[in-house]
Image: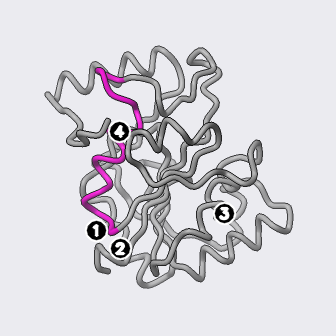
Amino acid sequence: MRTQDVTAVVLCGGAGTRLGSEDKTLVTLAGRPLVGYTVAALRPQVGRLIVSCGRDPGPYRSLGYEVVADAHPGEGPLGGIVSALAAVESDWILVHPGDTPFPDDGLVARLGPLADARGLAVPRSGDQRQHLVQLLSRDMAHGLATFFEAGGRAVRAWLDEVRAETVDMSDVAASFFNVNTPADLAEAERRLQATGGESSDTRS
C-alpha cells in the first residue's frame, strides 16, 4: 500500500461539552490546537488529509487544512465519515479522531497488511477495539455509507456487521489516548512534556 494511495479523514465533530463547550479539537495543548498534533503525526503516512468538521469550518481552514463540512451534524462520527467520502479520490481511507493527539507513526504500515487482505483493518489495544481508527478500502467505505443511509449510526455495530478484524497494537496503547475532559488535557500536556514532543505542524 503506497502512501499516496491513502487519504486520512480526521474527525473533528466533538462538541467538547466537558471542555467548556469549545470545539474540542481546537482546544489548546501546549500552545497549539489539539488537532495539530494529530495532523502532524498522520500527514507523513498519507497522500492527502481532510478534516471532517462538525461545527464552524473557518478555524480549520485558517490553519491551512482541507476541510469538509459534516452534512449530517448531530448524527455522530459516522455522519462525519460519510460526509468526507465524497471528497476522497484515493483507493484507501484512514479514519482517525482529531481529539487523539498522539497517533503512532507506524499506524498505516501496521494496519496495511490486514487492510490489503480484508479491505478493512482496525487496531486493538488489549481487549479494546479502537473503533474510530480504521484503514478501509473504497468499497468498504461505500458499504459503511449504505449502512448509514439505512439508519445505522453506531460505528461498533457496523464493524460487528462486517466482522471487522483487528491488529494488536497494545505495544503502543498510549497512541489511542483521547482528550475529553480538563483532566485528560492536563494528562496530554504531561505526556507531551515527558517525551519532549512537539508537533511538527508549523501551521498550528
What residue is at 25 percent from the left and 42 percent from the top? 201
Which residue is disc 3 drawn over? 82
Q: Nearer the viewer, mark 4 or mark 1?
A: 4
Measure the C-alpha gap from mark 4 to mark 2: 24 Å
Distance from Cα at disc 4 to Cα at disc 1: 21 Å
> Which one is closest to the eye, mark 1 or mark 3?
3
Q: Are marks 3 and 2 in contact (CB under 8 Å)?
A: no
Q: How many marks?
A: 4
In the rendered structure, are the residues bearing label 2 and label 1 in contact, judged by CB atoms less than 8 Å apart?
Answer: yes
Residue that extends furthest to the left in the rendered view of this protein:
196
Badge 4 vs badge 3, beta-carbon distance below 8 Å: no
The image quadrant that residue 139 belongs to is bottom right
- Left or right, residue 24 beside residue 173: right
Report the span colored magenta: 29-47
Residue hosting label 1: 109
Considering only order in the chain, which callout, 2 or 3, is on the residue closer to the N terminus?
3
